[in-house]
Image (cartoon, rainbow, N blue to C red):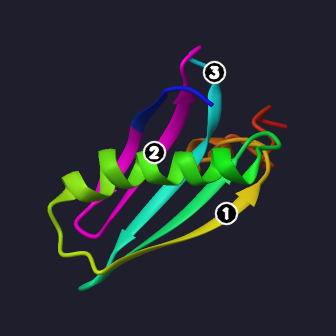
Amino acid sequence: MGDYYFQRQCRTPFSESYIILGDDDRRVGHIDLHYTQNITYGTLTVDTEMKEEDILELIEVADDELVVSADVPREDFVVSVYKGTEAGVYSDDVFDQGNGNGDGK
């Protein structure tokens, strides 16, 4: 499939969230990682249809570049995979402007 790059969106003591970019700097998807005492759980959302072999490669890259480097004990890496696209990003600022659609009306 190609190279993948991860842009961290947020981090807590027990979780991280990343946007995944492909080698052409296009968004490929998003992954959330949650670290427990022995197991790391991932929720992977891919933006387009991907073959299973490409999904497995992406999981392997995430494991090598993100999970292993997080320096937490890991007996297993369990990943749930979804296909979908981002519908938007919402924060309190949007709701403070009015009815939630961002136009202040």
The answer to whether 11 is drawn above or below residue 6 in the figure is below
Quadrant in which the N terminus appears: top right
Q: Which mark is residue 26?
A: 3
Say few, some or many: other residues with alpha carbon within 10 Å of mark 3 (under 14 / 14 to 19 / 20 or more).
few
Residue at position x 24%, y 57% from top?
68
Between residues 69 and 93, which one lies in front from this camera angle? 69
Which residue was labeled with disc 2? 18
Q: Measure the alpha-carbon separation of dots 1 and 3.
A: 19 Å
User: Which residue ends up furthest to the left in the rendered image?
Assistant: 71
- Between residue 45 and residue 52, name the one nearer to us: 52
Q: CA distance from mark 2 to mark 3?
A: 14 Å
Pinpoint residue 63: horizontal percent, then vertical percent: 38, 55
- Judged left or right of residue 28, residue 66 is left
Instruction: Tell me where the magenta segment starts and ends, as one range.
Output: 8-24
Which of the 4 image quarters holds residue 65? top left
Identify residue type, mark 2.
Tyr
Q: Residue furthest front?
A: 53
Res. 18 image quadrant: top left
Residue 93: x and y in percent read 58, 42
Question: Which quarter of the figure is the C terminus placed in?
Answer: top right
Numbered disc 3: secondary structure: loop
Q: Identity of the amino acid at label 3? A: Arg
Q: Secondary structure at mark 1?
A: strand
Q: Mark on residue 71? A: none
Disc 2 residue crowd, few under 14, some 14–19, many 20+, Cα 10 Å: many
Residue 6 forms part of the magenta stretch: no
